[in-house]
Amino acid sequence: MRTQVGIVGAGPAGLLLSHLLALRGIESVVVETRSRAYCEARQRAGVLEDGSVRLLSESGLGDRLAAEGLVHGGIYLQFDGQRRHIDFRDLTGGRTVTVYAQTEVVKDLIAARLAAGGAIEFEVTDTAVSRLDTDRPVLSYTGADGIRRDLECDVIAGCDGFHGICRPAFPPGLASVREREYPYAWLGILADVPPSTDELIYAHHRDGFALHSLRSPTISRLYLQVDPDESIENWPDERIWEHLQRRFALPGWSLREGPVLDKGITPMRSFVSAPMRYGRLFLAGDAAHIVPPTGAKGLNLALADVAVLAPAIDALLRGDGGPADAYSDTCLARVWRSTHFSWWMTTMLHREPGADEMTAQLQLSQLRYVTSSRAAAASLAENYTGYPELPGAAGT
Ligand code: FAD
Ligand code: DHB
């Protein structure tokens, strides 16, 4: 069996890559361990940068996004008993973000690929990659029908997330890993209740960070900082709402409560593995890098990587290896900017266990500065809405 590009993983990176390659007339096969239903229901990110919205729209995936995505022109930062607005439009010359859940991006991508006759094999097992240092790498897997297949490819894209098999397939010692774990995690809930806010609220509180996001005019998404070793069983719904109420409390404002539809705990880490390429294997998205979620960057980085990778593969298959050779460095410029911003937002807003009063005062000083200095607010706004000047945004 043969295809041009073997893609491991049907997350946002793998699916968008398959779509962008198809637009260039390049055939691919996507293999995925989970079921279609699981991929479409997995609750994760919710905020798209300006450039991600343009990228999806310009590649023909913008219909539902335009109809259902909620354009936000800013965020609120809450600390020290006050809630302050950061106005992205004003600070960045009109840039915005769009609230549109990762579940919806994945549904749109799967529908588009299947409608175009694209191959996505769900529920595969024992995925393996081999012959990566040749120009005929092989992607092997056992299909849902129990049949083992060896797919000979021109290129393999490892879009299989942080726990995938592609990054570990690099020869030992080739990649350098930079990593930081944080002493906290996020407990996230999806609630069947209209949001209590028009734009996202990032709240710094002495009990820990909280975030009020949303999925639609009727569904709220909320997060609480918890200890990294917390178990979800210790968090009945009443306890979650009690903590959310305390951390968001503001005179004259109230948080609406409703039935909890989904809940889970996410660990937080910064991780960058470089280079993102070995031979004919290219990594994209969480397979190569992870950011803590506070800057809402993980999904956007995954999309930006494949916006660079699709034309690089196209050129490589036509005999020009230049863009493929530059792929890793090109992506890493954006990856490191987002890694810094996510680390900065995270450390400014979370309570560090055991932190002294000095740390607390430094955080508060930074929050006062970023909400009162136009220069500091503009820097936050520019980072949050994305970096059009870095490759990976639409059309670059
Ligand atoms: P993924 O979405 O992880 O997709 C990888 C795919 O590969 C998966 O479908 C997986 O099943 C499949 N796969 C893995 N191994 C194999 C294999 N061996 N063979 C075949 N397929 C395989 N970002 C934010 O900005 N905000 C958030 O709130 C947020 N919350 C998150 C919560 C969780 C629990 C996680 C894990 C991530 C979260 N992120 C968040 C990050 C964001 O969702 C990711 O950055 C984004 O999903 C990256 O997309 P991806 O396609 O690179 O990887
Ligand atoms: C969401 C997640 C984030 O990490 C973030 O910074 C903002 C919003 C969300 O899931 O809606």
Image: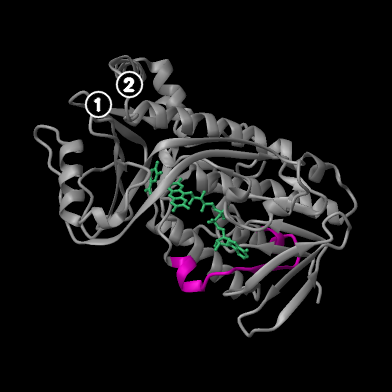
Residue type pointed to by label 1: Phe
Q: Position of residue 268 (x, y in %)?
A: 44, 42
Q: Position of residue 38 (x, y in %)?
A: 46, 69
Q: Which mark is residue 79?
A: 1
Identify the residue at horizontal 51%, vertical 72% (top origin): 36
Q: Position of residue 43 (x, y in %)?
A: 40, 58
Left or right of 339, for residue 376: left
Identify the residue at horizontal 43%, vertical 38% (top origin): 96
Left or right of 46, for residue 162: right
Image quarter hosting the C terminus:
top right
Left or right of 143, for residue 349: left
Q: Residue furthest left?
A: 252
Identify the residue at horizontal 46%, vertical 67% (top origin): 40
Quadrant in the rendering for residue 121: bottom right
Specify which label sits upstream in the sequence, 1 or 2.
1
Colouring scheme applied when the structure was drawn:
one colour
- Are discs 1 and 2 less than 8 Å apart at CB? yes
Q: Which residue is mark 2?
A: 367
Badge 1 element: strand
Q: Which residues are magenta?
A: 20-40
Q: Would residue 258 be seen by someone viewing this image from the given angle?
A: yes
**Pointer 1 local density, CA inside 10 Å: few below 14, some 14–19, many at least 20:** many
Residue type pointed to by label 2: Leu
